[in-house]
């Protein structure tokens, strides 16, 4: 069984973690397959990426069987994680994490690295690291406090409570929560909406938000101006203006 599946359907790419018997836990083989899947998506004509898990979980994090009795060289092992997560974060298209069931440890980090998170009602987030005596990794100390604030991030990392979908929505970890029976349809609808949008601008939004996290206001204003120059010369901007003038829906193509 392939540990990672890739589907390209129209302008929508879907990467599915495919180890349902392990709750889609990540090991070195799966991480390498995920890296290749991201390369395939990058080279495709996809305009949105959906990231999801097979079976009853999104991703349970690191496969602890690979860790053995604590003999794993975590610093070296994390280099593989870091390459994958940075590639995911830098994709020039919107990334939607479709979270069904549990997302724990690095699996939660994977969801937080995406641009948007749509959760089923049965989804659960667990930071998990402190439960097994580990410090947080896979970018969680970057993404989590930016979503929920420093104090809440510390609480979630130190105490590692189970955060259900309703609580995740309330604290800003989720963008939308839908009933389990409507989950697949909601994922497909949101992916289609994103794919039909000005995806060049979506990529610029991602760059601007990441830049703003580590720069001051003056630098951000200059960066916004440079990005706006790119957007202003795009085909989608011209189409948006024409559609506004003609009082019709725009037809964006991501250029």
Image (spheres, rainbow, N blue to C red):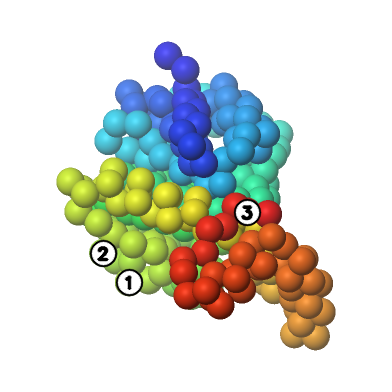
246 or 106, which lies in front? 246
Label 1 element class: helix
Instruction: Estimate the x, y position of residue 26 in percent, counting from the top left.
Output: 49, 31
| Up/down of 205 relative to 30, above or below | below
Q: Quadrant of residue 70?
A: top right
Density class for disc 1 (Cα within 10 Å; few <14, some 14-19, many ≥20) is few
In the rendered view, would you say 79 is above or below 194? Answer: above
Mark number displayed over residue 254: 3
Q: Position of residue 110 (x, y in %)?
A: 51, 46
Q: Residue furthest bottom?
A: 218
Look at 65% across and 48% down and name the residue there. 91
The answer to whether the residues at label 1 and label 2 have Cβ atoms under 8 Å apart is yes
Which residue is tagged 2? 166
Badge 3 density bin: few <14, some 14–19, many ≥20, Cα 10 Å: some
Q: Closer to us: mark 3 or mark 1?
A: 3
Which element type, helix, strand or loop, lies under badge 2?
A: helix
Considering depth in this image, is 208 or 105 the residue closer to the camera? 208
Which residue corresponds to mark 1?
170
Camera sees residue 168: no
């Amino acid at each position: 069984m392939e540990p990672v599946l890739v589907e390209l359907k129209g302008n929508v790419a879907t990467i599915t973690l495919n180890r349902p018997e392990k709750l889609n836990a990540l090991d070195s083989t799966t991480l390498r397959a995920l890296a290749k899947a991201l390369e395939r998506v990058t080279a495709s004509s996809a305009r949105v990426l959906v990231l999801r898990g097979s079976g009853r979980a999104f991703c349970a994090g690191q496969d602890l069987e690979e860790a053995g009795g604590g003999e794993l060289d975590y610093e070296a092992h994390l280099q593989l994680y870091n390459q994958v997560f940075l590639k995911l974060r830098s994709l020039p298209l919107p990334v939607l994490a479709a979270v069904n069931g549990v997302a724990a440890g690095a699996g939660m980090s994977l969801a937080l690295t995406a641009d948007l998170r749509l959760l089923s009602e049965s989804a659960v987030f667990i930071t998990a690291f402190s439960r097994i005596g580990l410090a947080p990794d896979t970018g969680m100390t970057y993404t989590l406090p930016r979503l929920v604030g420093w104090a809440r991030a510390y609480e979630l990392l130190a105490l590692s409570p189970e955060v259900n979908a309703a609580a995740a929505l309330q604290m800003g970890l989720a963008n939308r929560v839908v009933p389990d029976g409507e989950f697949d349809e909601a994922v497909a609808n949101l992916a289609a909406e994103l794919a039909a949008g000005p995806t060049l601008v979506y990529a610029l939004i991602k760059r601007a938000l990441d830049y703003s996290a580590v720069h001051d206001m003056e630098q951000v204003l200059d960066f916004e101006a440079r990005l706006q120059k790119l957007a202003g010369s795009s085909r989608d901007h011209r189409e948006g203006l024409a559609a506004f003038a003609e009082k019709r829906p725009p037809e964006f193509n991501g250029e």
